[in-house]
Image (cartoon, rainbow, N blue to C red):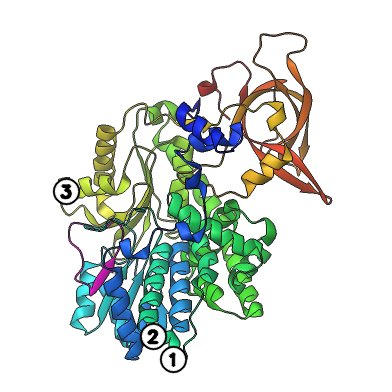
Amino acid sequence: MPKVIVRTYDPHTYDALSSSGLSPVLARIYAARGIARSEELETELTQLIPFDQMHNIIRMAAYLADAITANKRLLIVADYDSDGATACAVGLRILRKLGAIVDYLVPNRFEYGYGLTPEIVQLAHATKQPDVLITVDNGIASVDGVAAANRLGMQVLVTDHHLPGEILPEATAIINPNQPGCSFPSKNIAGVGVIFYLMLALRAEMRQRGAFASGLQEPNLAQYLDLVALGTVADVVRLDSNNRILVQQGLQRMRQGRCCAGIQALLQVARRNPQQISTYDLGFMLGPRLNAAGRLDDMSLGIECLTTDDADYAVQCAKQLDELNRQRREIESTMQESALVQLENKLPMQQAQIDQTSSICLFDTDWHQGVIGILASRIKDKYHRPVIIFAAGNAHELKGSGRSIPGFHLRDALDWVAKQHPGLIHKFGGHAAAAGLTIAAEQFDRFCAAFEHVAQAWLTPADLTRVIETDGDLNDPDINLELAEFLERQVWGQGFPQPTFSGQFLVESQRIVGEKHLKLKLRKLNDAPSAPNRHSNLSYDGILFFYSDPLPDRIDAVYRLQINEYNGKTTLQFLLEHWFPADSALADHAH
């Protein structure tokens, strides 16, 4: 069961932030997220880490400039998720502005799987006949694929951000902040951020060569930050200070109406107001629609949406992506019901058995390979265990997608399994929180046992207890629309969580709206012992989504400040994320 705690912070850091002019509430929020100085909150482009700190980037930029001058044919090999699609779009758009002959190829996940495989190399050679392959958001583990390209006379430039294996591919050049010898401070940059940095270096190289003095127009690369922001948030990378700058700058462009036709179209089909777009919209509205193409069909549709300047065509693409996303949600719902039934049959005592289990691995022949990652995330959230979901692949193989919890590095765990059981895993890759793998179908039970073994060895009971962190209580004077609007416009996400607050409330009224949500009127209760005037003089609107049973009269709640717009009127409301009967042990009564 979850445990609710208040985020801690260094009081000296809090004092320093307060002295710099931040309100006590904001000083508390930022101090709890590791911000030591107000300067760390600056989001101007001048604060970006210089591109020359990325290992090999100057050499790769020089090679690309030579290739453009020599009219070599470039081919971007993309990944089939939002990060890969936006990275491909950034590369295509900027390289074309710089005079390159460039095309793209994105693997169909069901035919070719992930990355620069020998099969994709052969397809590229046969259909596109490129001189140079440029990988985006993949390639660091493509040892065989790069070797195949080399044999066919194609040179490979690898741009990636995933963790490398023990052997690096023999590419012409590799840029990846996580490769050995790279001192680039932001190890959390997304694939789209890596290719954007390469484009910064390439523009500087071409400027130095005088390319823009001889008729070629120098591009303003800031205009592509909308794509960088979308890919960064959608890939759920840690939002360190450098990533927050990239995202904030991209959001500002979108709010000003200066985004590409594809993002405008995605906002339109998602019915989101561009002027009020937030990281939530990027991660939960635009990202899933873009990802749907790679999950169910072909990410070429998403890349076409992001690279066209034709507004009508962009809307046409966006509508197709929206329909694919509707189909994806239906498939996901069916799979989730099936997974929960399987867990109940597998674990008759369910919660008691889950408490004794450190991991969950599931497989069903009917599950859709493109949706298993989402299902893994849903099951992980429900049971707070590392989860790997498998679907049928090609040639008697199973494709697995995993999601993990804090304290359990998923890619390292798969590496451990691979070393302890040679041949069990055909291939794998990923991050601490997410990874993919392939095994033989007949090895499913053996893999489950091996994965459970490492999970039991590495995870403690504390690791297996879900923790809900909040920023504590808010006093009435701090609860206002201005604070909600400020928080709404900041960059929040992985590693830099959106502020949530906790408090005790009197439920003055409650009614069902939209047939499945609770609309509430809440009055704050103070911390003092029970007394006639213990409650606040102010009451607040609240909403509890997807819950329609009556609440008790008094509750403890974890909530976010939310701006509610209805009938042209803007008001403040509390969005309840969790609630518990008042004065109870929070860890035992989570809803």
Name the residue beneath numbered marker 3: 419
Q: Quadrant of residue 312?
A: bottom right
Labels 1, 3: front one? 1
CA gap between label 2 and label 3 equals 52 Å
Amino acid found under the numbered disc labelled 1: Ser
Label 1 or label 3, whichever comes before in sequence order:
1
Name the residue beneath numbered marker 1: 214
Q: Quadrant of residue 266?
A: bottom right
Left or right of 168 in this view: 494: right
Q: Secondary structure at mark 2?
A: loop
Left or right of 80 in this view: 182: left
Answer above or below: position of 98 versus 317.
below
Q: Residues within 10 Å of mark 1 (few under 14, many from 20)?
A: few
Q: Residues within 10 Å of mark 2 (few under 14, many from 20)?
A: few
Is residue 238 located in the magenta-colored stretch of the structure? no
Q: In which quadrant of the rendered image does the C terminus lie?
A: top right
Amino acid found under the numbered disc labelled 2: Gly
CA gap between label 1 and label 3 equals 56 Å
Name the residue beneath numbered marker 2: 210
Amino acid found under the numbered disc labelled 3: Lys
- Residue 280, horizontal then vertical, whole percent: 58, 51
Picture residue at 43% right of the left edge, 49% below the top: 240
Picture residue at 26% right of the left edge, 53% below the top: 442
Tag 2 and tag 1, C-beta contact below 8 Å: yes
Is residue 171 located in the magenta-colored stretch of the structure? yes
- Residue 376, horizontal then vertical, whole percent: 43, 47
Q: Residues within 10 Å of mark 3 (few under 14, many from 20)?
A: few
Extent of the magenta region = 165-178
Q: Secondary structure at mark 1?
A: loop
Q: Secondary structure at mark 3?
A: helix
Return the residue nearer the eye: 428 or 282. 282
